[in-house]
Amino acid sequence: MSTAFPDDFLWGVAFAANQAEGAYDVDGKGLSQADVVPFARPGDYVELHALMSPNPERIAQAATTAGTADYPKRRGSHFYERWEEDVELFAELGIRALRMSIAWTRIFPTGEEAEPNEAGLAFYERLFRRLQERGITPVVTLSHYEMPLHLVTEYGGWADRRVIGLFERYADTVLRRYRGLVTYWLTFNEINTTIIEPYTGGGVVDDGSPGRTGRAHQALHHQFVASALVTARAREIDPSYRVGCMLARMLHYPATSDPADVQQAQHDNDMNLAHTDVQVRGAYPGIVRRFWRENGIDVVMEPDDERILAENTVDFLSFSYYMTLVSAVEPEKYGATGGNLFSTVKNPHLETSEWGWHLDPIGLRIALTDLWTRYQVPLFIVENGLGATDRVAHDGSVGDDYRVDYLRRHLEQVREAMADGVDLLGYTTWGGIDIVSASTSQMEKRYGLIHVDLDDRGEGTGNRTQKQSFFWYRDLIASGGATLDA
Ligand code: BGP
């Protein structure tokens, strides 16, 4: 059987600055919105959102609290200090791509400075030069849930149009600085999160006042405009740059063959894909305008906005895929289970992870086929992985055959989609190295192929240990995908 993975397939791993770097106040970095999110107890959807989205009082308290004790994303998994060791481990994996993000607050600590922070620029330049030396292509996310806290508290996050200009200045700075070192740029991580979790995605604080949903849609519009403007700027600065959008693909199945459930699933899928409609096709679909009308949402647009969106669509579509969801007209008739950032109707045909996320490899093939058929632009899987409570054996080894199984079964479906003609640039498994979870801020929800000796409270040596999945993925890459059937 042909491996179906092209020779230039971008095998890789992925993480985000706010979950990996730590060093939250080192070398001039400012406080980001992630630095004030406290440790979350694994709880239900509502509790999780309350913890993921701190209210003004919790933010004020955190902003005046030094240290990392209650704020796991202030320490991450120490990538900022151990990056050279980690890059050597990534090189040993044989990866060709490292999807990572730049922390805006390392470059402009409050977002408003007249000049960028050279220490921050220099850190990422050292990192990119070392990656280049190791034959690893960086895939760089400009905004991955880590905007300056100052813009959250003083502007109301992305709901304020002035943030577009501040983001453009940040993007312009790094796009110019890293010419020749970076090719692939992503503008906003999981841009649909701004609606699902407005604080995490758009810095829109839940202050209890009415109209937060409207502010979230306004924030999302500003991010779409900013993304389009930055896409245009990237092409001016370096024609070799390739800019992608990034969606949390929330693939929904109907609970039954009842046409009402099927239509509900179609609606839920189209509302998710509305985000890529804007960034790949260049315009809002009708169902979004209907949602605004029917929910009294008045998204304020400047006269040029729709032209900007139409004329500056992306080069490729990247997305995260973890699990699938279920749509039902009467969801209360069914059980519920967890999901990435929200819960869903339980699918009786699927097992779930420890965190209740449906395990659905075939869903990834369906998602790839849907996206390719709908958009006909190159795709890039920039997040896929399994969060699990890995155990370290007495001999120090970390056996994670369940993660090998998850990756194998999802990559088998990737191969099937590619055999059908889907143009896929690469696959960067989420985590690569154990990092702080985005939703629960836990270390114990581990995604890495490399174990990090830190617990939920940040206790431990921080030492790295290659897991069973590290060696499996290394051999898979070396074989160009052939060992998938081993
Ligand atoms: C996505 C985020 C990532 C990552 C992933 C896993 O939404 O883009 O940052 O964290 O989810 O989610 P979690 O870490 O909450 O398990």
Image: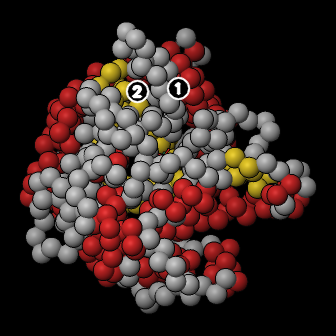
Residue at screen point 68% across, 74% down: 287
Identify whether 135 is placed above or below 69: above
Residue shown at 39%/55% (left/top)? 38
Residue ID at (14%, 48%): 123
398 is higher (above) or lower (below) than 143: above
- Residue 153 percent location from the top left of the image: 33, 76
Tally of numbered tags: 2
Q: How is the image coloured?
A: secondary structure
Badges 2 and 1: C-beta atoms under 8 Å apart?
yes
Locate residue 304, reporting x and y percent.
41, 86
- Quadrant containing the C terminus is top right
Using the rendered view, name the quadrant where residue 418 is placed.
top right
Q: Answer left or right for 109 relative to 481.
A: left
Instruction: Determine the secondary structure under disc 1.
Output: helix
User: What mark, if any, has residue 298 been given in the picture?
Assistant: none
**Image position, residue 271 (x, y; %):** 64, 65
* Residue at the outermost right position: 258
Q: State the image quarter where residue 315 is shown.
A: bottom left
Viewer-proximal residue, 120 or 152?
152
Amino acid beneath label 2: Leu
Side (left or right) of 405 relative to 21: right
Q: Secondary structure at mark 2?
A: strand
Can you tell which mark lies on residue 449?
A: 2
Question: In the picture shown, does residue 277 fall above or below 128?
Answer: below
| Identity, as a three-letter code, of the amino acid under mark 1 | Arg
Residue 468 visible in the displayed image: no
Q: Can residue 351 be seen here?
A: yes
The tag earlier along the polypeptide, 2 or 1, is: 1
Image coords of residue 55 (percent x, y): 44, 71
Tag 2: Cα neighbours inside 10 Å, few (<14), some, or many (≥20)?
many
C-alpha distance separating marks 2 and 1? 9 Å
